[in-house]
């Protein structure tokens, strides 16, 4: 008689039911309310709201700064992960813990701290001949700050599990360090880098607390889209806020779908190679 296997969790049907219920309550139903409120608008009202020059400029700033910040994190996040994995030095655990600080630090505290540092009379800002705080540069710095841990924590375990014998074999075959990194190491890191980039980009798009202090919130210059949404909510314009939020949701979904497509393509390509 075959012994019945005991499972820690209930069967597939019940587990799937709990999963769908949980996702529906936390994700699907709240997001569906955006569509529900937006449908109460006519097409002309909807278009007028989302195509307002002030709103369009906020789209450009939010997506542009988020993409730039995520790209910078994709480069320096790999360098930081490499140092933390490949080298031993005093204070390594302390630096490793600092990487997670943006996760734990309240975003408002981060915004105030960055503003005081990069203002014209701040510890860092005073050494620059151009303004950093209250400009798109300051917004990008804030988004880099909150997005860095995503790249580091995605790349770090891949480097830890990477077989150094492959690097040694590459060196024996005559490859230099750059060729070894480009042909052997980078293909293994690329999926993790793309995932970290996607998470940092998505996090930056929705960031509010750390940005409003350093942005200055000047219309048509340093006003991000989440701030416009909050402003409309404070004015009890819930329909207008949800219309702009819907545009952000759709564009974000398309961009993340595109990034995931690139990740799938790179995985497939390197597996065949």
Image (tube, rainbow, N blue to C red):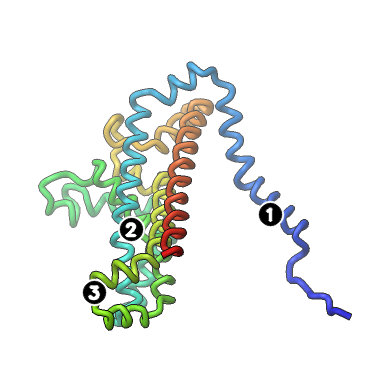
The quadrant of the image that shows the C terminus is bottom left
Tell me which numbered mark, 1 or 2, is placed earlier along the sequence: 1
Mark 2 highlights which residue? 74
Question: Which residue shows up at 31% across the image and 52% down it?
Answer: 71
Q: Given contact means CB atoms under 8 Å apart, are the residues at marks 1 and 3 in contact? A: no
Q: CA distance from mark 3 to mark 2?
A: 21 Å
Tag 2 secondary structure: helix
Q: Residues within 10 Å of mark 3 (few under 14, many from 20)?
A: few
Q: Quadrant of residue 266?
A: bottom left
Q: CA distance from mark 1 to mark 3?
A: 47 Å
Tell me which numbered mark, 3 or 2, is placed earlier along the sequence: 2
Report x, y in % for residue 4.
Answer: 83, 75
Disc nearest the viewer among 3 and 2: 3
Disc nearest the viewer among 1 and 3: 3
Question: Which residue shows up at 36% across the image and 77% down it?
Answer: 93
Q: Residues within 10 Å of mark 2 (few under 14, many from 20)?
A: many
Question: Which residue shows up at 31% across the image and 44% down it?
Answer: 65
Report x, y in % for residue 136.
Answer: 26, 42
Q: Residues within 10 Å of mark 1 (few under 14, many from 20)?
A: few
For residue 19, which numbered disc appears in the image? Answer: 1
For residue 177, which numbered disc appears in the image? Answer: 3
Report x, y in % for residue 128.
Answer: 12, 50
Tag 1 secondary structure: helix
Tell me which numbered mark, 1 or 3, is placed earlier along the sequence: 1
Give 181 or 88, whichever is nearer the viewer: 181
Q: Given contact means CB atoms under 8 Å apart, are the residues at marks 3 and 2 in contact? A: no
Total marks in image: 3
Residue 158 shows up from this direction: yes
Report x, y in % for residue 137.
Answer: 24, 45
Q: Residue furthest right?
A: 1
The quadrant of the image that shows the N terminus is bottom right
């Amino acid at each position: 008689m075959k012994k019945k296997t005991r499972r820690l969790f209930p069967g597939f049907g019940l587990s799937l039911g709990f999963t769908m219920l949980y996702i529906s309550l936390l994700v699907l139903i709240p997001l569906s309310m955006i569509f529900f409120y937006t449908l109460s608008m006519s097409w002309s009202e909807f278009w007028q709201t989302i195509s307002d020059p002030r709103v369009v400029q906020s789209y450009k700033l939010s997506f542009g700064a988020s993409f730039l910040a995520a790209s910078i994190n994709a480069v320096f996040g790999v360098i930081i992960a490499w140092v933390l994995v490949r080298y031993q030095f005093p204070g390594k655990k302390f630096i490793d813990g600092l990487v997670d600080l943006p996760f734990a630090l309240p975003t408002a505290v981060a915004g105030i701290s960055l503003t005081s540092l990069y203002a014209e009379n701040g510890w860092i800002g005073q050494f620059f001949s151009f303004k950093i705080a209250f400009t798109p540069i300051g917004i990008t710095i804030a988004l880099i700050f909150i997005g860095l841990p995503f790249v580091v924590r995605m790349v770090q375990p891949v480097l830890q599990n990477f077989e150094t014998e492959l690097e040694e074999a590459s060196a024996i075959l005559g490859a230099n360090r750059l060729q070894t990194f480009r042909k052997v190491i980078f293909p293994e890191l690329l999926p993790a880098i793309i995932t970290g980039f996607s998470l940092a980009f998505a996090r930056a798009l929705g960031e509010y607390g750390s940005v409003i202090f350093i942005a200055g919130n000047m219309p048509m210059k340093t006003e991000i889209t989440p701030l416009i949404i909050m402003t409309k909510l404070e004015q009890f314009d819930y329909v207008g806020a949800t219309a702009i939020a819907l545009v952000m949701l759709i564009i974000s979904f398309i961009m993340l779908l595109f990034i995931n497509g690139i990740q799938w393509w790179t995985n497939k390509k390197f597996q065949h190679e």
